[in-house]
Image: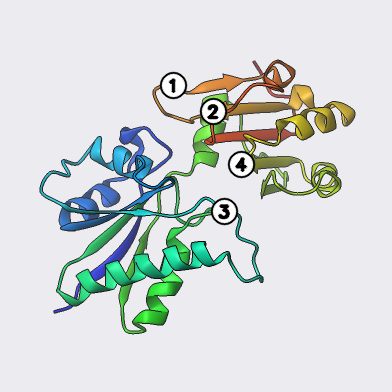
Amino acid sequence: MKGKFYIVGVGPGDPELITLKAIRILKECPTWLAPAAQKEGHSTALGIASGTIDPSEKTILKHHFPMKKVHMGKTPDPEVQAAWEKAALLINTQLENGHNVALPTLGDPAVYCTGFYVYEALLKLNPEVSIEVIPGISSIGATAAAAKTPLCLGDDRVVIIPAIFESDAIKDVLLQFESVVFMKVHKAMDRLVPLLEELNLLDSAVLVERTSMMDEQVHYDLKAIQNKKLHYFSTLIVRRTRPISI
């Protein structure tokens, strides 16, 4: 019997925010493919999963996924594409040998997750493969909880975008939607802070670094961190219709 592939959301960082189903699947899978942002680097998702489940008896396949931009509708960087395909090959080898494989991923797999690129590569390699996606608590929801602010109320409209967009596009979004969540803001605050100030939205914004992790930091004064080096895991929420409460 061939194995099954699981993409498992392990939450934003706090091991207690892993769902019961994710824990069960990770316990049952003998093989984990652990994603790492750097070659020979630490796998954050593996670290989170290991905070709840002992990985000592698992086969851990650590795999490097280059942190390069992916533009939908365009050919991905060859290094990125090769990483997806290599991951699919590693997974498929285990599946063909009858082993279930889990890919632990940060937050929820539905939100900017490498797991779905691997999903597509695996289907191309083996169209008959069995795959299941296990949802997880997203960094977006956890960030709102850390900041003690809702993402939306009443008839609010919410949009989630990477902060890599051009300033004009970001401005349009801020003017059109009541609640905006910015991902990947660690290198964009020098552009975002002046724009928020121009739109009189500084008091309506909050940034959280390393949401739900041991060294989580919540920042309400964005001007104070404008030139600060932020962690890659930083999320910004702007609530245009309701100032952020401190």
Q: Which residue is mark 3?
A: 68
The residue where tag 1 is placed is 215
Q: Marks 3 and 4, Cα distance to the nearest angstrom?
A: 12 Å
The residue under label 1 is which amino acid type? Asp
Mark pair 1, 2: CA separation: 8 Å
SS label for mark 2: strand
Q: Position of residue 165 (x, y in %)?
A: 75, 49
Q: Where does residue 229 sit, x and y in percent of width and height?
A: 61, 25
179 vs 207: above or below = below
Q: Position of residue 173 (x, y in %)?
A: 80, 47
- The quadrant the C terminus occupies is top right
**In the rendered structure, which amino acid carries the disc numbered 2?**
Glu
Q: Which residue is mark 4?
A: 184
Mark in the foreground, 3 or 4: 3
Residue type marked 4: Lys
Compared across the picture, whether 110 is left or right of 46 comes to right
Going from N to C along the chain, the mark reached first, 1 or 4, is 4
Q: Which residue is mark 2?
A: 209
Residue 71 image point, x, y percent: 65, 62
